[in-house]
């Protein structure tokens, strides 16, 4: 491979040149992220505390490519428990400053720190004593100097061969925004259950369903006592069509489980139908609770190589989930 094939405008094998270009771009962006990791210090912690203390919303703003990153930051913050909104700096001076209240915190993005369109938002922050966090690469810039907290991005080489198109710089902005969001998430103790409230749709929403939202309940549950004959037990399994039956004691607590697999394993023994449910039941069935995430229950099914689980509360069966239920719900 000639040197020309790895440079912009090279004349070597096109496929090789494309791969070389992609690897060069990613390598430069990785170097930028490494520099960002090393640069994190006290202002980052101060920013997390300021954002977490907001009684209103986090107002994220930026112009151009920084604006696109700011929109993503606002969306990530909002979906992870920190109310946030993007405000376009160009529209701010035409009435949108009214979206920013004294309970808010402003997070403003500008690589140079000299974005003219941010001036009205900076002035508004100062006038109403609204905390201003800057994300910029120039500490002495107009934005960096005006900020209460300045997150200074390390200078890094853009992946663009002309060193003009924002690439490495926006990657660092995006990553730093993610770091803020996750630090806030952890500070607030925002859980997967909380996350599901904001993500009810699509595959992610399905994965965040709880077992109680998927399980069979009430008369659908196949249950019997340990003294039931196998003919009675098989009839219950057939009627409920869930491939298993739970064995409960006189107090209604689950003491065992029989599955289709247990029936097959015992079908070759003499006198199967002369036995009771208690004779062949699995006395230590794996169970789950209603508040478990559906995705966790699926993981358990896969690990144990089983197809159904009883759902219990205080030792009593309140539901049953089958692998087919997760398929129907879109969890798998």
Image: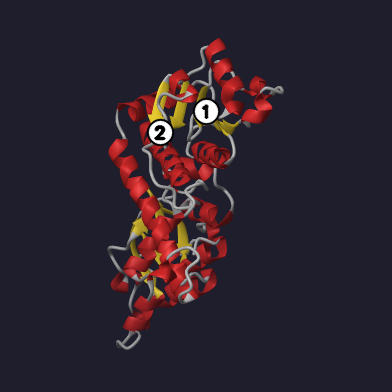
Q: How is the image coloured?
A: secondary structure
**Mark 2 or mark 1, whichever is nearer to me:** 1
Q: Residue at x 48, y 70 (%)?
A: 236
- Reading the image, the residue beneath label 1 is 114
Percent position of residue 107, x then y: 50, 28
Q: Residues within 10 Å of mark 2 (few under 14, many from 20)?
A: many
Viewer-proximal residue among 137 and 225: 137
Answer whether residue 288 is visible to the viewer in this image: no
SS at mark 2 in the image: helix
Pick whichever, 315 or 108, lies toward us.
108
User: Residue 163 in the image: x percent, y percent?
Assistant: 47, 48
Reply above or below: 232 against 151. Answer: below
Determine crowd level at label 1: few under 14, some 14-19, many 20+ residues with C-alpha closer than 10 A: some
Marks 2 and 1 sit apart, C-alpha to C-alpha, by 28 Å
Q: Mark 2 highlights which residue?
A: 184
Front position in the image: 194 or 107:
107
Position of residue 12 in the picture relative to residue 118 (left or right) = left
Q: In the figure, residue 68 lies in which quadrant?
A: top right
Left or right: where does residue 21 sit relative to residue 121?
A: left
Q: Earlier in the sequence, mark 2 or mark 1?
A: 1
Q: Is residue 86 visible?
A: yes
Q: Quadrant of residue 128?
A: top right
Q: Quadrant of residue 67?
A: top right
Residue 72 is labelled as none
**Coordinates of residue 314 in the picture (x, y in percent):** 36, 46
Query: For the point 31% across and 35% down, which residue is it?
Result: 40
Quarter of the image where the N terminus is located: bottom left
């Amino acid at each position: 491979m000639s040197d020309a094939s790895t440079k912009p405008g090279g004349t070597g094998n096109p496929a090789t040149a494309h791969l070389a270009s992609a690897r060069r771009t990613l390598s430069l962006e990785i170097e930028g992220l490494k520099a960002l990791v090393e640069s994190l210090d006290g202002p980052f912690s101060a920013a997390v505390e300021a954002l977490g203390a907001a009684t209103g919303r986090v107002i994220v703003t930026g112009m151009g490519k920084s604006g696109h990153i700011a929109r993503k930051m606002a969306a990530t913050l909002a979906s992870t428990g920190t109310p946030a909104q993007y405000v376009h700096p160009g529209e701010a001076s035409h009435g949108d400053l009214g979206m920013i209240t004294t309970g808010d915190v402003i997070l403003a993005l500008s690589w140079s720190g000299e974005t003219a369109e941010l001036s009205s938002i900076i002035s508004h922050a100062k006038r109403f004593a609204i905390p201003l966090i800057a994300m910029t690469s120039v500490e002495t810039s107009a934005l960096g100097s005006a900020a209460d907290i300045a997150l200074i991005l390390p200078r890094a080489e853009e992946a663009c061969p002309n060193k003009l198109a924002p690439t490495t710089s926006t990657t660092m902005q995006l990553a730093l925004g993610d770091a803020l969001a996750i630090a806030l998430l952890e500070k607030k103790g925002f859980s997967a259950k909380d996350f599901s409230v904001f993500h009810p749709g699509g595959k992610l929403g399905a994965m965040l369903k709880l077992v109680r939202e998927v399980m069979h309940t009430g008369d659908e549950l196949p249950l019997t006592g340990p003294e039931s004959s196998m003919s009675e037990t098989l009839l219950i399994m057939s009627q409920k069509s869930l491939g298993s039956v739970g064995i409960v004691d006189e107090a209604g607590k689950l003491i065992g489980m029989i599955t289709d697999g247990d029936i097959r394993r015992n079908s070759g023994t003499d006198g199967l139908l002369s036995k009771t449910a208690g004779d062949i039941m699995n006395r230590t069935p794996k169970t789950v609770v209603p508040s478990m995430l559906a995705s966790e229950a699926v993981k358990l099914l896969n690990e144990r190589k089983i197809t159904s689980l009883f759902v219990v509360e205080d030792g009593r069966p309140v539901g049953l989930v089958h692998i087919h239920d997760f398929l129907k719900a879109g969890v798998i």
